[in-house]
Image (tube, helix red, strand yellow):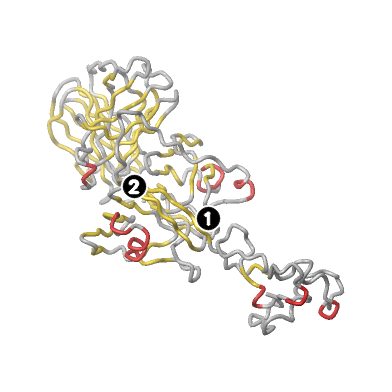
Amino acid sequence: CCYDAENDADGDDICGDVDECPYDFDNDSDNDGVCGDVDVCQGFDDNLDENENSYPDDCEGCMDSEGVNYDPIYIFDDGSCYYSYDVSYHEGSNLESFYVLPDVSGYNDTYPTQLLVEENFGSNVNSVLGAEASVIFIDGMMYGSLLDIDRVSGYWINLSESDNVNLTGYRTDPNTVYELNSGNNLISFPADEAYAIEDVLPDYLDGVITAVLAEGNAALYMDGMWFGTLTSLEGFNGYWFRSNDDIDFVYDISENALSREVASVEKQVLPGYEYIQSSKQSFYFIKDIPDAEIGDWIIAFNEDVVVGTRRWDGAMVDVPVMGDNNEFYSFGYVDEGQIPDLRLYKTSTGELLQLHGSIPGFIDHEIFVIDELSTTQLVIPNEVVLNNAYPNPFNPVTNISFNLPQAMHVDINILDVQGRIVDTVASDGFNEGLNQITIDGNNLSSGLYFVQLIAGADIKYTKILLLK
C-alpha cells in the first residue's frame, strides 16, 4: 500500500512512515502537509478505487489492532476485521453459543453443523441440542435435523471429554434483534466479555423476562429485583430466557454497560460432591434455611448420587438439580417428576442434615420457589391446606402443593370464571402431609381459572392466571 522504495531509508517496507513518505508535494491536493492520508497516497499500485469511496482499495482493510487481519498500512477501516478466540469446554453438557462462527470468508449468519463439529471438535461431540432441533453423532455420522448453527441461538454441546477450541471469524453485531416467544427461548449474547444482567437488559423487559437459566445457575426476576447466582451474561454462553410474552429486543450493550464489565460467574464447587453438568436441569430457589450459616452448602441427591450443589450465602439461592438426559454421565440423575433429596452440609462440622419442606418434583428447565426448608421434620397439619400456585401467572405449567391431615382421596379440578369444570387434574388417594401436583395448561385458553381441591368434606380454592 503506497510503498515508495526510493524513499525507504530504513528498509522496513512500511508505507507512510516518515523516512519513506515525509511529504509528497505533488499529491497533496488539500495542502495539509500530512503524509499518508488519502490525497497523498494515491499514486501506488494500479490506483484503483472500485467502491468509489475516495480511498484506494489497497489502503482499505482491518484497522483494529485486535483483529487477526489487522495491518498498520491501512488508512480506512472497511469493516473486514475478524477475530480469534480460545474457548474451553468441559466434559458433559456445555450450554454455549457462537459469538464468532469459524469462517473468515465473510460475515455469515449460519454455518453447517457437521463442518463446525468436524473442524473444531473432531469425534469428541456426542450430540448438539438446540431449542427445537438436535443432532447426534454415531461412528462419525450425524443424524438429526439441526443442520446449521446460527449466531442468535444457544446450544447444548455434549462432549465425551474436556476440550479447548480456537474459533476464528467475524463478531456478531451487538445490535442483533432477538425474537422471543412466550415461554422458554434459548439464545446467545453478542459480546466477548461479561456484563451485569441489569445493565444489558432494556427496561421494557422488566417483568416480561421472569427468569434466565444458564449452565448450572439461574437468575429470577421477582419484586423488581434479580435473585440467584447468575448475575452477568457473557459471550460464547447460551441462555434460556423465560418470557411472559412474544417480544423482540436488542441488548443494551452501551458505553455505560461497557464501563461496568464484570467478572464471569463463579462456578461453585464443593470438593467431594462434584457432579457433571447435564443438558436437563431445574432450579430450586430457596428463600430461607433457618439452620444454615453463611458458607454452608445445600446438596441435592437422587438416592446416593449428587445431582447439584449450591453454597448458602445468607439470601435466596438457586440450587441446580440435574436430570437424566440419557448420556452415560447422567446415569442415576433425577427423572421427570422425581423429588430430589435436599440436604444441608455444615461446613463447620462436616455433617449432612436432611432438609424438610415443600419440595416439588423435577421438571426440565423449570424454576421452583421454596419459602423455607428446615432440618426439623415439619408437623403434620390438622386440616386441609391448599397453597398458592407457582409460578403464577404461568405458561404453560404451574405447580400446586397441599397438606393433608391424613391419607385420603382428593379431587383436584380446574374451573373457569363461570365455575364450570374445564379439566380434572387428579382424582386419587394422597398421603398425609405435603403433596404436590403439576398443572399443564397446554389445552386451556389464556385467562383466569380457579383450582378446586375436594378432600372429604373440605373444599378449597386458589386462583391461577394462564398467559399464552
Q: Tell me the kind of residue under disc 1.
A: Val
Going 17% across and 38% down the picture, which residue do you hit?
426
Can you tell which quarter of the image residue 61 is in?
bottom right
Q: Is residue 386 above or below residue 101?
A: above
Amino acid beneath label 2 = Ser
Q: Mark 2 points at which residue?
A: 162
Do tag 2 and tag 1 residues touch (Cβ < 8 Å)? no
**Location of residue 164 in the rendering, given as x and y in whole percent from the top left corner:** 40, 51
Q: Residue at x 39, y 39 (%)?
A: 217
**Looking at the figure, which quarter contains the N terminus?**
bottom right
In the picture provided, is 220 more to the left or to the right than 430? right
Q: Is residue 446 left or right of residue 105?
A: left
* Residue 27 pos. (x, y %): 81, 79
- Upstream in the sequence, badge 2 or badge 1? 2
Q: Circle 1 is placed at which residue position?
A: 250
Q: Going 45% across and 66% down the picture, which residue do you hit?
A: 103
Q: Distance between the residues labelled 2 and 1?
A: 33 Å
Left or right: where does residue 258 sit relative to residue 39?
left
Q: Which of 318 and 435 is in front in this view?
A: 318
Of residues 333 and 81, the one nearer the viewer is 81
Provide the secondary structure element on which disc 2 rests.
loop
Q: What is the quadrant of residue 136 in the picture?
A: bottom left
Which percent across, then down, holds residue 418? 29, 43
Callout 1: SS: loop
Is there any visible trace of residue 453 in the rendered image?
Answer: no
